[in-house]
Amino acid sequence: MKNHTLSNTGLALVLWMMFSGCLADTTVTVGSKKFTESVILGELATQLVRSVGTRAIHRRELGGSRVLWNALLTGEIDIYPEYTGTLYHEIFAQQVTEESELRRLLAAREIEMSRPLGFNNSYALGMKEKVAQKLNIHKISDLLQHPELVLGFSNEFMARADGWPGLRAHYGLPQRQVSGLDHDLAYRGLEQGSVQVIDLYSTDAEIQYYGLRVLEDDRHYFPDYKALFLYRSELLKQAPEAVVALRTLEGHLDSVTMVALNAQAKLERIPDSQVAGNFLEQTLGYHPQSTPVTVWQRFYRHTKEHLALVSVSLLSAIIVAIPLGVIAAYRPHLGQIILSIAGIIQTIPSLALLVFMIPLLGIGGPPAMVALFLYSLLPILRNTYTGLRDIPPQLLESGAALGLSVAARLRLVELPMASRAILAGIKTSAVINVGTATLGALIGAGGYGQPILSGIRLDDVGLILEGAIPAAGLALLVQGLFEGVDRVVVPKGLRLAEEKR
């Protein structure tokens, strides 16, 4: 009986430990879009989740609505801030018009949404006050009289169903000089006069800072964009306390407050985490759960992430490209096919290639590594092929005359003779890889691209340099490293012969 009791106790203890372990291992991942307000809301969610003892990480500036929505569906993130207008018009393409129907559609995808946080961040069009006054433009319909105006809209607004295509059709706008650009850069374009009309978020702090006139939506095109949080339904079971904490923000964030928070981050250069922490402490009485991150801590983290992206993708490319180069040199017809495929991959714009990887591998480091791997193939592959094909026929005949097998001739004669060309290809790939890896931040891979993105968003040159200078330094370091490898790997006689030329 005693042993039986001990067994039950032991089983209960194991189950408790397993259950406790599961809870302790629960990590909530919060995502945010690539603009300041979304980053602040993501930081608010992260700190609220941490306030109840649940581990949370914030993957900031992941891209646009579709990227975040797909990441939520696949479970790569658990929470992200969204807007009602985006759900109705962009995500569900006007399938529903009522909140109850919207919740039903979300529930069918195992997604829940909080109640609105308290503010409406609608789209709007804006102009410099002086220009609008001179042209007597007060409403969007006034633009009909000025087809010569240059319009510059954020890239997402250019493509969204509730963006420029719908707005142009709704108002019958005649402008043809319309270009897409980064939302944060659009304000600078407006200030410099390169564009006359841009799209705005109604809670942007820059509206007052740049003295902009917000054009009245007199034909009522733009819907409400009430901010809220979307989260995965399974979070209710895995970390219910985190959901409860998240929903304490419902109705506590009005438009005036959101504009002020945006201004603190964008105009006063206060870190997003500090802006969010101060608000939670003053409004909800939470104590900040995050400690300030120093420049060196950021540098260390970004360096680790960047080195991981570059080293994994480059090493993989070396392992794959050199054998393919050998095959291409030995089988010329097949070689042309291999080189053509690698060449086609190289022509795909790097940003597009990164985005193509998202449906296959999601967001974060893996898709960025695969994209960088594909980009690294061609220089190594082509140089291996060229190096082997350029070996003087007399040397190959000598190897054959000595009775060397094909494998032995390749290992002892051809690859050493082609080593300088192969290393040059690897060096080129490495330098390209280091630079291109900065784009990985666009899909949540981190690295030196992260401070560059944040710097562009916040118009902070210091932050941009925080990513650009290390990236350039790493490229030089990699080049120097392969110069050293060249001296070790390339046969001395071959080096001396080339130096005499």
Image (cartoon, rainbow, N blue to C red):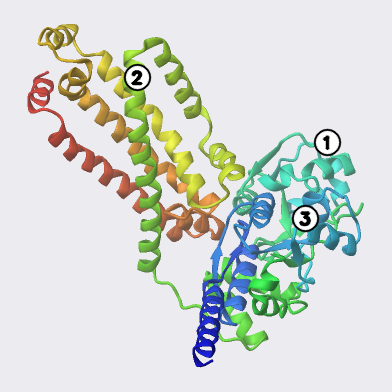
Q: N-terminal of the two: label 2 or label 3? A: 3
Amino acid type, residue under disc 2 in the picture: Ile
In the rendering, at what x and y percent does residue 229 appear? 72, 67
| Callout 3 secondary element | helix
Give residue 233's quadrant in the image: bottom right
Which mark is on residue 67? none
Q: Which residue is mark 1?
A: 174
- 53 w.r.t. 323: above or below: below
- 108 w.r.t. 334: above or below: below
Q: CA distance from mark 1 to mark 3?
A: 25 Å
Front-most of residues 368 and 151: 368
Q: Nearer the viewer, mark 2 or mark 3?
A: 2
Q: Nearer the viewer, mark 1 or mark 2?
A: 2
In contact (CB < 8 Å): disc 1 and disc 2: no
Q: N-terminal of the two: label 1 or label 3? A: 3
Q: CA distance from mark 2 to mark 3?
A: 51 Å
Q: CA distance from mark 1 to mark 2?
A: 57 Å
Residue 328 makes an appearance in the image? yes
Amino acid type, residue under disc 3 in the picture: Thr
Give residue 422's quadrant in the image: top left
Q: Please give left or right for residue 140 compared with residue 233 in the image.
A: right
Residue 128 makes an appearance in the image? no
| Callout 2 secondary element | helix
Residue with the most extreme front position? 1
In the rendering, at what x and y percent does residue 119 appear? 77, 70
Amino acid type, residue under disc 1 in the picture: Pro
Q: Which residue is mark 2?
A: 327
**Quadrant where the N terminus lies?**
bottom right
Q: Which residue is mark 3?
A: 86
Please tell me which residue is depicted at 51% across the width and 93% down the height of the picture.
2
- 402 w.r.t. 455: above or below: above
